Amino acid sequence: MSGEAGDPPGLDPALDRLPPRQSRWGRRSPGRLDGGVGSDRGGASYAALDLGTNNCRLLVARPAGDSFRVVDAFSRIIRLGEGVSSSRRISEAAIERAVAALTICRNKMKNKGVTRGRLIATEACRAAENGEEFRARVAQETGLELEVIDRETEARLAATGCTTLVDPHADGAVLFDIGGGSSELVRLDRSQQSRGGPPLPQIRGWISLPHGVVTLAERHGGIVVTPQSYEAMVVEVGEMIAPFAREHGGDGLRGVHMLGTSGTVTTIAGVHLDLKRYDRNRVDGCWMSEQEITVVIGRLLAMSYQERVASPCIGADRADLVLAGCAILEAIRRAFPCPRLRVADRGLREGILVEMMRDDGVWGGGNQVAAS
């Protein structure tokens, strides 16, 4: 493609690994484009990588109009956090899966001439005793330097990536991101239009729970889920949400809708739409009523593990995790009873891209995230 840069700094194409004494790719350079591209929008190619507890995801994009255009993407379930809640360590098998996925991401970024990237890691790396060792190994074997972000940053990025899906006629939204090792809730007021680019999120409050689909399924079981074990998961998560709900729920929910970004809600939407294969164009931005969500969760609870594996919107990779995700969603719904939910097949990666592009002034606006 025209306008693409060469190999990212720190990667030797002949050796296909990080050469000694060169800087690793992934170091942040706020306020400018790495590689000296400056304000040349035609040549600016951005990468956002999210290494989560369950998934490794990459987006490569270029500015376009008041948004951006995705030119490449990658997603793979790697279960980096498998067993971390009990062992406190990332296993060798998980490290190998992550390195293999990250190598693919590195090659995609090279091929697309990425000039600036932000490569984040979340709860698994925050919680694991060998998180720093893992990051060093990733840098040595792939040339990618991961940035472990805190939970507040994770919540802000999720909100930034989803603002275009907040109903402009609503008074705000309760955004939730059900991850593998943690889950974030963000109380949003009506988005503020920026001078360029997507709207700015108006964050009233946020909370991060130390539970995601992987950690909860490991605690309560994910293959065989009884009504009793399911309710136990709901209650456990609900107790964690209760203080946040007392502050941001109740009468304050009038005119507010829910906005969900995670594999859990996209799976629920796919089942609701009776998709024979997952279709992002139909899922991203779709609305579901409270009753429709209840019906789908009931269907999932009635399925056996084998039936969940056979479902085209679940599959073997998620069959033992989806009910833990439903339990987290149910706890959120009980705490924040909103009549409708908008489903987002977007989130952290899009938030990263928006923040980088806003920092670089590609849309002519500022980079402030508002909070009331």
Image (cartoon, helix red, strand yellow):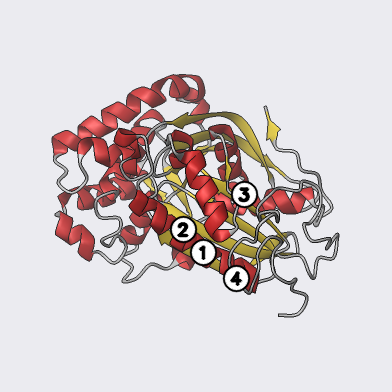
Residue under label 4, please give it: 15
Check disc 1 and report the residue beneath it: 103
Between label 3 and label 2, give the one nearer the viewer: 2
- Per the image, label 1 sits on a secondary structure element best described as helix
| Mark 3, residue position | 351
Residues at marks 2 and 1, CA–CA distance in whole angstroms: 6 Å
Gap between marks 4 and 2, in whole Å? 17 Å
Q: Quadrant of the C terminus?
A: top right
- Closer to viewer: mark 1 or mark 4: 4
Any part of residue 285 in sight: no
For the residues marked 3 and 2, what is the alpha-carbon distance in whole angstroms? 24 Å
Earlier in the chain: of badge 3 and badge 2, it is 2
Of the two numbered discs 3 and 1 in the rendering, the one whose residue sits closer to the viewer = 1
Nearer to the camera, 90 or 254: 90
Disc 3 + disc 2, Cβ < 8 Å? no
Of all residues, the one furthest to the bottom in this rendering is 1
Kind of residue sitting beneath label 1: Thr
Viewer-side residue, 117 vs 17:
17
Farthest residue in the front direction? 20
The answer for how far apart the CA atoms under marks 3 and 4 are is 33 Å
Identify which residue, 292 or 345, lies in the foreground.
Answer: 345
- Image quarter of residue 7: bottom right
Residue at 62% x, 60% y: name it.
18
Residue 144: percent from the left, percent from the top? 59, 55
Quarter-wise, where is residue 77 in the image?
bottom left
Count residues near mark 1 (Cα–Cα under 10 Å), then give few for <14, some for 14-19, many for 20+: some
| Residue where numbered disc 2 is placed | 99
